[in-house]
């Protein structure tokens, strides 16, 4: 019989939020949910595989391997819907990239949540919300560039949420091509006082793998001073139980 620990429960809760993750993301998430307050890096691939094997034996996760992925992918087996994620749908690569980013935020001491659902047709749902020390960030994972018209609408929505909902910054973890376009359009559409609070960091490749420096998104000059969560709307964030 497999003994489920507190860290196992925390890992499964995180997996329910991101829906599925590859072994690399599991390595970082395990480090972030471990005993060390500031982990030096991800746990070994062997330790991640051991965790996956234990959870498979307990019937708590499922596992598969999509054709575009070199390694295996895991997902929570006891979701309310009981559905197995479609590893071959168009957005699967992006979803795994979001899990990769979320795991690295966990390793930095952040809590990771899904963003709230759009309230209007003009509203935009970010890929995630990262929270630490009373401050929250909107996080976007950008593997392919959008059109300038789409960025105008999205950046306008980001500006509104930075102003009205108390988010500290918007962070794009992107491919180099996507990061360049995000920056170009942000320069066009964000007011000068808000512009430093949207950053684009070229750390991803087109496959959704993190290939940049591990610290790139958290270097000091990108951490612009910003308001705390006072006046924000945490009830609007999607909470998964």
Image (spheres, helix red, strand yellow):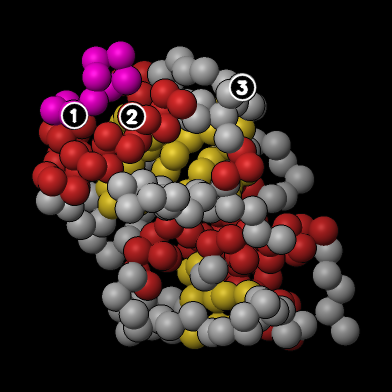
Q: How many marks?
A: 3
How far, Cα to Cα, is label 3 from label 1?
Answer: 26 Å
Q: Secondary structure at mark 2?
A: helix
- Closer to us: 12 or 155: 155
Whether tag 2 and tag 1 are in contact, CB under 8 A, the answer is yes
Q: Please give left or right for residue 199 compared with residue 138 in the image.
A: left
Q: Secondary structure at mark 1?
A: helix
Q: Residue, x 43% and y 83% (percent of image)?
A: 86
Q: Is residue 194 magenta?
A: yes
* Residue 84 visible in image: yes
Residue 16: x and y in percent read: 62, 66
Disc with the residue nearer the chain's start (2 vs 3): 2
**Residue 230, numbered label:** 3
Residue segment shown in magenta:
187-195
In which quadrant is the C terminus drawn?
bottom right
Q: Residue, x 63% and y 42% (percent of image)?
A: 235
**Residue 189, numbered label:** 1
**Residue 159, numbered label:** 2
Q: Quadrant of residue 231?
A: top right
């Amino acid at each position: 019989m497999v003994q489920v620990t507190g860290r196992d429960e925390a890992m499964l809760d995180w997996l329910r939020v991101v829906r599925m993750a590859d072994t690399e993301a599991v390595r970082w998430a395990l480090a972030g949910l471990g005993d060390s307050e500031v982990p030096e890096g991800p746990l070994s691939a062997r330790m991640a595989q051991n965790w996956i094997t234990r959870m498979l034996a307990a019937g708590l996760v499922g596992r598969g391997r999509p054709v575009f992925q070199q390694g295996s992918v895991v997902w929570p087996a006891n979701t309310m819907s009981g559905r197995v994620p479609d590893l071959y749908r168009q957005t699967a690569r992006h979803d795994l990239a979001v899990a990769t980013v979320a795991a690295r935020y966990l390793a930095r001491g952040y809590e990771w949540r899904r963003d709230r659902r759009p309230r209007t047709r003009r509203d935009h749902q970010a890929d995630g919300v990262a929270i630490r020390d009373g401050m929250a960030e909107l996080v976007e994972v950008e593997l392919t560039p959008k059109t300038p018209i789409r960025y105008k609408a999205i950046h306008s929505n980001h500006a509104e949420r930075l102003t009205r909902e108390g988010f500290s910054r918007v962070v794009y973890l992107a491919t180099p091509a996507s990061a360049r376009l995000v920056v170009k359009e942000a320069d066009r559409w964000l007011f000068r006082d808000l512009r430093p609070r949207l950053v684009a960091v070229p750390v991803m490749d087109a496959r959704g793998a993190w290939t940049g420096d591990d610290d790139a998104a958290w270097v000091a000059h990108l951490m612009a001073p910003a308001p705390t969560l006072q006046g924000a709307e945490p009830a609007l964030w999607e909470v998964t139980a």
